[in-house]
Amino acid sequence: ELKVYISCSDKEWKDKVKPVSMEKIKELMKYTKMDLNNLQFPNAFIAFICVAGKNDGGLLSNVLNGEFNIEELVNLNKEIYENWSADIDPMKFEFLTDEVGISYLIDFNDNEQIWYGEECVESSSFENFLMQCAIRQYEIEKYKRCGLFVTRDQAVPLGNDEYYIADL
């Protein structure tokens, strides 16, 4: 279903994605201490990384302005595991950090909702999150060459003491 939707805006997406091995998934579970806590990644997450865990074809990386790569996550989490193991919280899995350093995470304490940082719920599930990213990607592609201005005659009429920003 996701491939069909994404192909509407990016016909080459299925050719750009690269899977990750089950070995890497197991390593990631080890270095995040998920295995010690009998936690499993959501099925939609496993399905996605088995298709696009090494290269997401831009679905998450471009839309969220960060890098999504399971092999890089394994390396990062391995370093944390080896040096700061006590600081690992297996109930919160960070899967992508954006360009300003804020992480997207799966919160196992909160029905596997997707959070942006610690304050904002982005989606109720990873599956919904993927569809939201696909919709954003489609909208970006569809509207990126469209003008965003409104002519004066198309603008909403002003009330008393209101001004158009362009007039200030």
Image: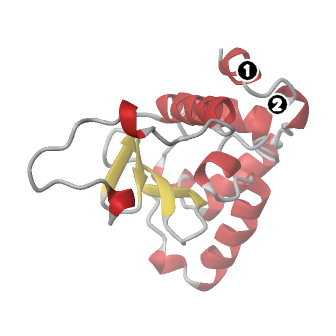
Label 1 Cα crowd, 10 Å radius (few <14 / some 14-19 / many 20+): few
SS class of the residue under badge 2? helix
- Residue type indicated by callout 2: Trp
- Judging depth in this view, the residue of 52 and 31 nearest the camera is 52
- Judging depth in this view, the residue of 98 and 68 nearest the camera is 98
Q: Quadrant of the N terminus?
A: top right
The colour scheme applied to this rendered structure is: secondary structure
Q: Is residue 124 visible?
A: no
SS class of the residue under badge 1? helix
Q: Is residue 112 left or right of residue 14?
A: left
Residue at the spot x=72%, y=56% of the render?
27
Mark 2 in CB contact with mark 1 (< 8 angstroms): yes
Q: Is residue 97 visible?
A: yes
Q: Earlier in the sequence, mark 2 or mark 1?
A: 1
Q: Position of residue 16 (x, y in %)?
A: 88, 37
- Residue tagged by mark 2? 13
The disc at residue 3 is 1
Q: Position of residue 13 (x, y in %)?
A: 82, 31
Label 2 Cα crowd, 10 Å radius (few <14 / some 14-19 / many 20+): some
Q: Is residue 10 left or right of residue 44?
A: right
